[in-house]
Every structure is written in structure tokens, then in C-alpha cells.
Amino acid sequence: MTATFWKGRAATARLFAFVAAASLSACATASPEAPASTPTPPATSTTASEPLTPVYTAGQATRGQGTFAGVCSTCHSRNEFAGPIFAITWRAEPLSGLYQQISTNMPQDRPGSLTPQQYVDVLAYILQLNGIQPGNQELVADPTTLARMDW
């Protein structure tokens, strides 16, 4: 091997050691009072890259349940929207994926015929079916906001 090769390897090793030492010193200086986890910001957060916790109201889920009973239940049972198969299919994606699916493809005989509010109310009902607790803000029919909401 050439001297240039070994010189480059030594420089890489020194850089790695420096980065590792800097990382460890940062860990050692962390405050012991720091909380174990940071709460997820509410839907009103202005930082566009932060994930949001899904929020909806109990009243919104009730409206969604009514829309589901009147429109969706002619083809679907509520059991299709909770449980392990639903979780595998949808819970790895942000809420925008499911909202996009139902708002552009449902109801099957009249796709896109409900209002954006009705679609997002049904989504709130689905959140409720999956054990997500209601809050004091309604879920909004905004694709950008829904894309930042994880289950």
C-alpha cells in the first residue's frame, strides 16, 4: 500500500475519533433534569417540519359516525377501520394518505361527492375507532396539516 493511502486512513481515523469524542462530551454535559421525551406540539404549531399529534373533537367524531352510518356502512363495516389489518395498511402513513384515499375514491358509487368537512369528520371517527383520544380542536381538512400527522 502506498504512503498516501495510509495517510488518508489516519486522517479519517482522527476525524472519526474527534466526532466520537465530541458526541460523548455532549452526552456527558446534558442536564439530568431534562425530560425523557418532548411532547408533540399541537396542531397550531408553526414549524412546518415537526410532526403533529392527530387532534379531533368528540363532536366531530360523532358527526363522522353519522356520515359513516348513512353513507359508508352500505359497503363497509366499522371493523374494517380498526384492528391489526387496518394498522398494517394505514398506521405507518400520515393521516393524509387515508384522507386522500377516502376523499377521492369514496363513496364508490359517487367518489368525491361528500364535502371536505364530511370526509375529515369520518377520519375523526376512524381515529376514535383506533383509540386516539379526542381533544379540544377539530381535525382540519388540510392536506398539508394531515401530512404532518402521524397516528
Image (cartoon, grey):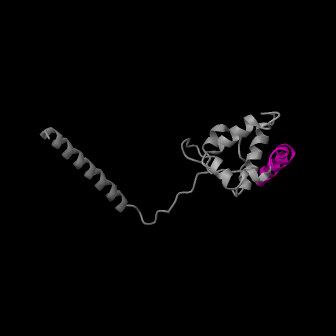
Residue drawn at (85%, 48%) of the image: 69
Residue drawn at (76%, 41%) of the image: 119
Find the magenta span and give its range: 58-76
Q: Quadrant of the N terminus?
A: top left
Residue drawn at (35%, 62%) of the image: 28
In the image, farthest residue toward the bottom: 32
Return the x and y of residue 93 as percentages of the image width and height: 61, 45
Q: Is residue 79 left or right of residue 3?
A: right
Return the x and y of residue 77 as percentages of the image width and height: 80, 50
Q: Nearer the viewer, residue 121 or 102?
A: 102
Q: Is residue 143 left or right of residue 105?
A: left
Q: Main secondary structure of the magenta part?
A: helix
Q: Nearer the viewer, residue 145 or 92?
A: 92
Q: Nearer the viewer, residue 57 or 94?
A: 94
Whether residue 51 is visible? yes
Residue 63 among those drawn in magenta: yes
Return the x and y of residue 116 as percentages of the image width and height: 76, 37
Return the x and y of residue 96 as percentages of the image width and height: 65, 41
Q: How many numbered circles are shown?
A: 0
37 up-or-down from 123: above or below: below
Whether residue 136 is visible? no
